[in-house]
Image: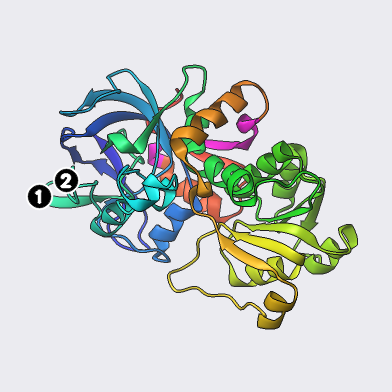
Amino acid sequence: MRAALLEHVGAPLAVRDLRLDPPHAGEVLVRVEAAGVCHSDQHYLTGDLRCPLPVVPGHEGAGVIEEVGPGVTGLRAGDRVCLMWRPRCGQCPYCLAGRPALCEAAGIQASSGGLLDGTTRLRDGDTRVHHLLGVSCFAEYCVVSERAVVPVPPEVPPEIAAIAGCAVITGVGAVLNAVGECAGDAIVIFGAGGVGLSSVLGARLAGANPIIVVDVVAERLAMAARLGATHTVDASSQDVAAAVGDIRPRGAEWAIEAIGRPATLETAFDVLRPGGTLVAVGLGAVGTTFAVPLNLLVQREKRVVGSLYGSANPLIDLPRLFELYLAGRLPLGELIGRSYPLDHVNAAFADLAGGSVGRGVLLPWGSP
């Protein structure tokens, strides 16, 4: 099968023929229909985040099951599925507590570059090739754990199903799960990429008001306004704290940072009102820290919390997101940006780094 291969940090991805072994017990073979181009993949390409190499990137995807391994129940060939980069073992304390985003099994996949048993199904000749976060969907096919897929209704297009598995559940989930009740509250969203724009949709769905979006790309801000932002702030030409203060003089109840930059996190903390909460969603380079003024943290009772994968329970939340999309309550089609064939994967990441608007999507087999 053809796949995009990262051999060295900083090197362009090479599209080549790799060997993919059949699924083992508890695994499925998926024909990839669409794969989202995410900043997290870019972090691995540049070395900001680390994984075993060589590796096939891609952690946000959707496709059709072609084969099931021994012992798989509840799934069969022909099922349409969304791929998840956070599996759920169903047995660790976090899964049992309804917080599968923190599943302990995810560490096995991340550190080993394999699937849940720590081994890989990918080969480049005699060289072992690793899976990224147990998915590796920048390819025509992938083998994943049965615990890393969620069924997709037939009416949901592949591109929508793909981005739902990362950008949408992360952004919408950050509002619905980490923020929670926020009707009438001010929320400031930093970053208007796929996750930030999904947060806008979640904030509108939850009734937040005003919804203020901060970015440095005018086209992204315009898209945020179309999706429900009541105000936008261009951080390339405006003082963000002052602009937010003009809109909400007492500060915002909530801020979501979907970029992963220390300076942006510090500004997000600054725009909070007393008792406000900053939800950190974006990932940065390994070891990145940011400064929190201790006295303001204590005296104004501000809070800083993290939200991984939208703090979601995907088996419950993804079907709900698909239902909301089909009901017209979540216009996820508006999030889709440019589509790329697999051979143009490096152009997709160049566009992402250049501030492309909407979520770029790879189509390994061409238009679905």
Q: Does the magenta stretch include residue 331?
A: yes
The N terminus: image quadrant = top left
Residue shown at 50%/44% (left/top)? Answer: 312
Q: Quadrant of residue 254?
A: bottom right
Q: Mark 1 falls on what kind of element?
A: loop
Residue shown at 60%/56% (left/top)? Answer: 258
* Range shown magenta: 330-343
Residue shown at 37%/55% (left/top)? Answer: 12
Amino acid type, residue under disc 2 in the picture: Arg
Q: Quick check: 37 above or below 21?
A: below
Report which residue position mark 2 lands on. Answer: 123
Report which residue position mark 1 lands on. Answer: 126
Instruction: Tell me whether the residue at label 1 lies in contact with that at label 2, contact meaning CB atoms closer than 8 angstroms.
Output: yes
Q: Mark 2 falls on what kind of element?
A: strand
Give the CA separation, mark 1 to mark 2. 6 Å
Q: Which of 220 and 245 is in front in this view?
A: 245
Amino acid type, residue under disc 1 in the picture: Asp
Q: Nearer the viewer, residue 366 or 246?
A: 246
Quick one: label 2, few (<14), some, or many (20+) residues within 10 Å?
some
Extreme-bottom residue of the structure: 295
Q: Position of residue 186 (x, y in %)?
A: 79, 53
Quick one: label 1, few (<14), some, or many (20+) residues within 10 Å?
few
Judge left or right: residue 13 versus residue 254: left
